[in-house]
Amino acid sequence: MIPNLDLYTISLWVLPVLLAITLHEAAHGYAAWRLGDDTAYKLGRVSANPFRHVDPFGTVLLPGMLLLSGSSFMFGYAKPVPVKRNKLHQPRRDSVLVAAAGPAANLLIAVASAVLIHVVQFLPEEAASWSKKTLYLSLGFNVFLAVLNMLPVPPLDGSRVVLGLLPPRLALPYSRLFRFGLWLVLGLFILPPLIGRNLGINLDIIGWIVGPPVQYLSRLIRVLAGHA
């Protein structure tokens, strides 16, 4: 749950959200580059510089609106990395790997955040407290993004993984869903919670789906990183 909004809360969320979203996209670009498509590389998108990936709405306004609205979850996105499927060495296989690279990067960031929690305890007390809270948010948010993006709902990464794994006779009708991607996201992510809130019932469909795996993976990463 996101606590009441204040400047301190915003300061805790800025780095986790910015790095998680932008490095997610950089990972797509890096995977595509290594697999034969240098489109993103030539555009400077294979970079850890967040400003090369920031989307004004998805990276700034949308997370900000969710914070201001008191949403129970945080979500955002960066500018999609351009990938030319025909330039990949093995388009069918490599498109799956490129799609999976973003969620994989988020899991790596989550692991790094869990490890760094041990390091920041040696900072001055106030800095250590702020850093520890930020890293815990980073851990949870990155696991959430990884699990969320692997849902087979266009335009999320999981839909492109599924598209690459389906036989052609099933991939073609499935691909037609991509034109409705924005409406599918709005219909699943935004509208049910808003309607449920007005009706006084819980319609957090995404929370029901991703909650258990997010909790399990977050707990597993904490244990592997040596946290109780």
Image (cartoon, rainbow, N blue to C red):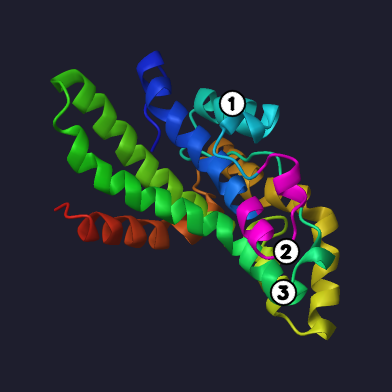
Within 10 Å of the Cα at label 1, are there few (<14), some (14-19), or many (20+) other Cα atoms? few
Q: What element carries label 1?
A: helix
Within 10 Å of the Cα at label 3, are there few (<14), some (14-19), or many (20+) other Cα atoms? some
Q: What element carries label 3?
A: helix
Residue 8 makes an appearance in the image? yes
* Numbered circle sitting on residue 164: 3
Residue 42 versus residue 58 in the image, above or below: below
Amino acid under disc 1: Met
For label 2, the residue is 36
* Numbered circle sitting on residue 65: 1
For image coordinates 15% across by 33% down, the residue present is 121
For image coordinates 67% across by 65% down, the residue present is 35
For image coordinates 57% across by 33% down, the residue present is 49
Residue 152 makes an appearance in the image? no
Q: Nearer the viewer, residue 226 or 72?
A: 226
Give the percent coordinates (x, y) of residue 191: 66, 43
Q: Which of 140 and 206 is in front in this view?
A: 140
Q: What stretch is highlighted in magenta?
A: 29-45
Viewer-side label of 2, 1: 2
Q: Which of marks 3 and 1 is nearer the N terminus?
A: 1
Measured Cα–Cα span from mark 2 to mark 1: 38 Å
Measured Cα–Cα span from mark 2 to mark 3: 17 Å
Question: Which quadrant would residue 219 be assigned to in this image?
Answer: bottom left
Q: Which of marks 2 and 1 is nearer the N terminus?
A: 2
